[in-house]
Image (spheres, rainbow, N blue to C red):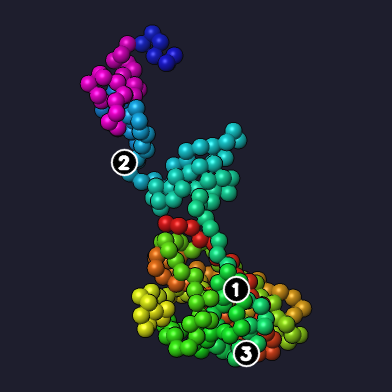
Amino acid sequence: MSSFTGKKIKDVYKDILHTSNSNTGIGSTIKQVTCGDGDTSSLYLSDRNLKVQPSADTTTNTVIYDAGGNALLTVDSTNDLIKAGIGQHNVNTQYAHFGVATAALQSAVANTHYAIPFNRTFQQDIVAIGTGTNPDTSFTISSTADDIVLCYWYIMDNITIDRVVWWSGADASSGDTTRCHLQSFTIDSGNGSTSGDLSSGVVLADGADITNAGYEQAYYQQMTIQSANVDAGKAIMFMFRSDSVNSDFSINATIKYHLR
């Protein structure tokens, strides 16, 4: 308050913040904080609540810094995100994993997309999801329910995919050209005769073909995200394809995502 010293109210009233409450002070009803000439702020106060609501969205509003001036907590009111830490990561960032060992892909045939188990669950029988450039956009269970359910990542809340990476390793000296897709589907969860069937497939992420030379080295790829948002109730699958069968492959895929 030292800046008010020796000054008249008419010279400083615009700089005085207050809640318009008929001179009764802070009450139990939340009110917007304004300055002396009536201009509003983004701050609302009561003796029980605090609310910050900008009148117009901005790109970011940094709330807390460390002593070095680094942002520690940032509210992005344009994209409805909260980020924290030196790395400014979404506070609800999570990771999901798909993976399989070479033994499961020994029966794979060339130019066929195969569903990779979710959370690195081993399975003996692999499930084919098409032979086109991309996996099929639908799948009907006939006699493979026990195998395909191991490949479903069932989405229980709306999410956004932030990053997808995968590693592969061959088991022979001659490799193959490989390709992977992350794809979402509408899944029937009605427990009827079509329960578990997939439709309306959308490619979430993919990448350029990788020419794998064999077991002398492992291969890494960060995939290109094509469609980031996935709604609750969808199923996500990770699919692998090779143009020949010189090798069998182990697959290790990680998906970074956040709730929205």
Element type where label 2 sits in the image: loop
- The image quarter containing residue 34 is top left
Disc 3 residue crowd, few under 14, some 14–19, many 20+, Cα 10 Å: few
Residue 55's disc number: 2
Q: Is residue 203 above or below residue 84?
A: below
Type of the residue with mark 2: Ser
Q: Which residue is mark 3?
A: 107
Mark in the foreground, 3 or 1: 1
The N terminus sits in image quarter:
top left
Question: Quick check: 220 above or below 39?
Answer: below
Please state the extent of the stretch shown in magenta in the rendering.
Answer: 8-30
The answer, for residue 81, to whether it is visible in the render is yes
Whether tag 2 and tag 1 are in contact, CB under 8 A, the answer is no
Query: Does the stretch in magenta take in 16?
Result: yes
Sooner in the amino-acid sequence: mark 3 or mark 1: 3
In this figure, which residue is indicated by the disc labeled 1?
121
Kindly check if marks 3 and 1 are in contact, taking CB atoms under 8 A apart as contact: no
The C terminus is located in which quarter? bottom left
Mark 1, secondary structure of its residue: loop
